[in-house]
């Protein structure tokens, strides 16, 4: 059995740790604000990954370090680089492999057809540039590295465009205003599939210093919204999209530069992940159910309080 460190205690980090622990590995989950009861083979440690010397001590004996930490969306250029540098230096210090959780932003706004994991990165946004630089830092490390790239998340606890913009009005039986082209096919990655891909990547016996895509489901935002409404037992909502002017007026500044992701089809080739890592995407209805169940419970009238609208 191996020793693994998971940096980040969000839904993907916690699920990754759970899978590793259930497989019999010793797992340390770490973040600055981790609040997790110790489970079988899993230990929670509060640590700041930007402090490479201290973080190195946490990682002593680790076979691999999973980088699942997330920075605030408006602070990626300032907060992500110190995290990546600290984790990379710690991995080099202890001789641990690096498994980086990334996304598709680095491909930029121009690619046509299926996105492949061997495709050159050509970011067209600040956030895409940040993700590209983070992966380049991992590739420069003196240890093997793999990046697992996911699309927009579905799943319990995921904070995404869908959970922020579509789910609240769906729960309230109100019209839904979303982004981009509602009928463009889009890749949706299930948080549990992301974790399964990360875990499988740790055991990859081929050449490292490469990327894998998370197997995902491809449906349009319109279809996702309508299927979610049906799963909630709601009538199909009226649908619309935000203009750039509306986004700016509503303070959605960080979403403006990324709106291109939903303006045209976003299709993901994960065939190598399926063949080499043995991971396949869950059905879209499974993803939807996992996404909405906690919200459905929280939204029951008996659970509402006058002090908590």
Image: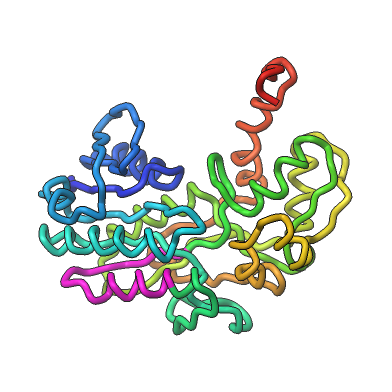
Q: Position of residue 122 (x, y in %)?
A: 48, 83
169 horizontally vs 75: left or right: right
Q: Position of residue 293 (x, y in %)?
A: 63, 33
Q: In front here: 75 or 17?
A: 75
305 horizontally vs 61: left or right: right
Q: Is residue 189 above or below residue 127?
A: above
Q: Is residue 137 magenta?
A: yes
Q: Is residue 47 above or below residue 38?
A: below
Q: Position of residue 111 (x, y in %)?
A: 59, 83
* Badge count: 0
Residue positioned 60% across, 84% down in the render: 110
288 horizontally vs 231: left or right: left
278 horizontally vs 64: left or right: right
Residue positioned 79% across, 42% down in the render: 229
Is residue 21 visible in the rendered image? The answer is yes
In which image quadrant can residue 180 be found?
Answer: bottom right
| Quadrant location, the C terminus | top right
Residue positioned 70% across, 50% down in the render: 165
In which image quadrant can residue 148 be found?
Answer: bottom left
Residue positioned 66% across, 58% down in the render: 252
Is residue 42 visible in the rendered image? The answer is no
Q: Is residue 260 above or below residue 178?
A: below
Colour scheme: rainbow
Q: In front here: 116 or 153?
A: 153
Q: Is residue 266 magenta?
A: no
Q: Position of residue 201 (x, y in %)?
A: 33, 60
In which image quadrant can residue 228 be found?
Answer: top right
Image: magenta residue range: 130-149
| Quadrant location, the N terminus | top left
Q: Is residue 32 above or below residue 203?
A: above
């Amino acid at each position: 059995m191996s020793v693994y460190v998971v940096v980040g205690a969000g839904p993907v980090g916690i699920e990754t740790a759970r899978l590793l622990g259930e497989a019999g590995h010793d797992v340390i989950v770490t973040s600055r604000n981790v609040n997790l009861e110790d489970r079988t083979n899993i230990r929670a440690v509060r640590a700041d990954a930007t402090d490479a010397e201290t973080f190195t001590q946490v990682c002593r004996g680790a076979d691999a370090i999973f980088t699942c930490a997330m920075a605030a969306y408006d602070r990626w250029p300032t907060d992500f680089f110190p995290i990546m540098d600290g984790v990379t230096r710690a991995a080099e210090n202890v001789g641990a492999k690096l498994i980086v959780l990334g996304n598709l932003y680095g491909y930029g706004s121009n690619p046509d057809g299926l996105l492949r994991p061997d495709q050159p990165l050509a970011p067209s946004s600040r956030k895409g540039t940040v993700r590209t630089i983070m992966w380049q830092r991992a590739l420069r490390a003196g240890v093997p590295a793999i990046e697992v790239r996911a699309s927009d998340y579905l799943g319990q606890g995921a904070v995404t465009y869908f959970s922020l913009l579509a789910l609240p009005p769906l729960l309230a039986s109100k019209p839904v205003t979303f982004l981009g082209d509602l009928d463009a096919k889009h890749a949706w990655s299930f948080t549990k599939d992301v974790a399964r891909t990360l875990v499988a990547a740790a055991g990859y016996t081929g050449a490292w210093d490469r990327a894998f895509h998370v197997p995902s489901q491809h449906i349009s935002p319109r279809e996702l919204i309508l299927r979610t409404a049906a799963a909630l037992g709601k009538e199909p909502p009226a649908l619309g999209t935000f203009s750039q002017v509306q986004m700016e007026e509503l303070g959605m500044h960080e979403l403006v530069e990324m709106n291109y992701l939903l303006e045209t089809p976003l299709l993901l080739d994960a065939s190598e992940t399926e063949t080499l890592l043995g991971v396949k995407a869950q059905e879209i209805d499974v993803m939807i159910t996992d996404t909405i169940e906690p919200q459905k419970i929280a939204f029951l009238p008996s659970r509402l309080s006058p002090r908590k609208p």
